[in-house]
Image (cartoon, helix red, strand yellow):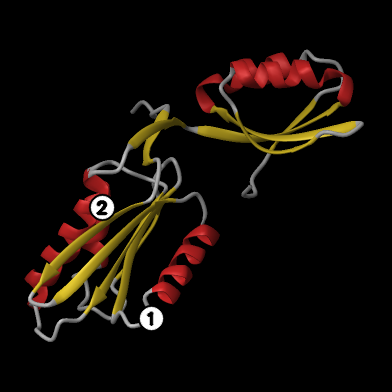
Amino acid sequence: MIKPDKYKTITTASTGDFRDRGSKFLAFAYPVVSLAEIKERLLALKKEHPKAVHHCYAFRLGTDGTQFRANDDGEPSGSAGKPILGQMDSLGLTNVLVVVVRYFGGSLLGIPGLINAYKTATAQALESVEKTEKWIESKFEINFDYPVMGEVLHVLKQAEASIYRQEMQLFCVVVAGIPTIFCDNCIGRLDEIRGVKVKTVTTEY
């Protein structure tokens, strides 16, 4: 099986709003890249909607999409988190968090009604937002002396690399995400520049 070179995600935050028998289901979709960012988003929404009875959510992280979670937050098992995740997966999205905030309207909806509500609110939030494809990257730390900075940055730019951190002093450090498809060529060119050292990065930036 050939591994993909790109992954699909959303470019900005978006919202959805579904109502049924007095209950309000407000969906919030966000592009995310880390568990820490997801935690921040959830805390912010709980502060923004303190009177909501449920804050159900799902996320999928990583370019291979293997890191994910679906949380029902007190709703019947499988009635909230899974329908949210299902809508994300139907669009092939990763690095996305969707939270659906529920205000109870006084009438029980039953499990089919809940599934429909969480699914529909999520679909509304995701269908209108702009989607994009991004290169699957491998991260590297590049160490070099200041005089060769121009050469290093030129090579990274030609490889369409993302810069996650840079310290430009007498001795420079750049943490870059290099599209996996261009890695061998890019690192080969960096190695040819005098004094450049490249090492793989495993921590988040």
Q: Position of residue 82 (x, y in %)?
A: 24, 62
Compared with residue 85, is residue 105 higher up or lower down, i.e. above or below?
A: below
Q: Nearer the viewer, residue 195 or 73?
A: 73
The span from disc 2 to disc 1 (Cα, nearest Å) is: 21 Å
Badge 2 element: helix
Q: Which mark is residue 50?
A: 1
In the rendered structure, which amino acid carries the disc numbered 1? Pro
At x 32% / y 38%, what residue is drawn? Answer: 130
Q: Say which label, 2 or 1, has the lower sequence index.
A: 1
Residue 204 visible from this viewpoint: yes
Q: Nearer the viewer, residue 198 or 123?
A: 123
**Spot occupied by residue 50 in the image (x, y as percentages of width and height):** 38, 80
* Image x and y of residue 192, in percent: 78, 13
Secondary structure of residue under mark 1: loop
Give the residue at x 49% y 66%: 39
User: Most extreme residue toward the bottom, as rendered?
Assistant: 106
Quadrant where the N terminus is found in the figure: top left
The residue depicted at 83 percent of the width and 32 percent of the height is 172
Instruction: Mark 2 and mark 1 in contact? Answer it, CB < 8 Å.
Output: no
Q: Amino acid at mark 2?
A: Ala
The percent position of residue 69, horizontal first and vertical second, equals 36, 62
Horizontal side, residue 115 vs residue 96: left or right: left
Q: Which residue is mark 2?
A: 125
The answer to whether residue 191 shows anywhere in this view is: no
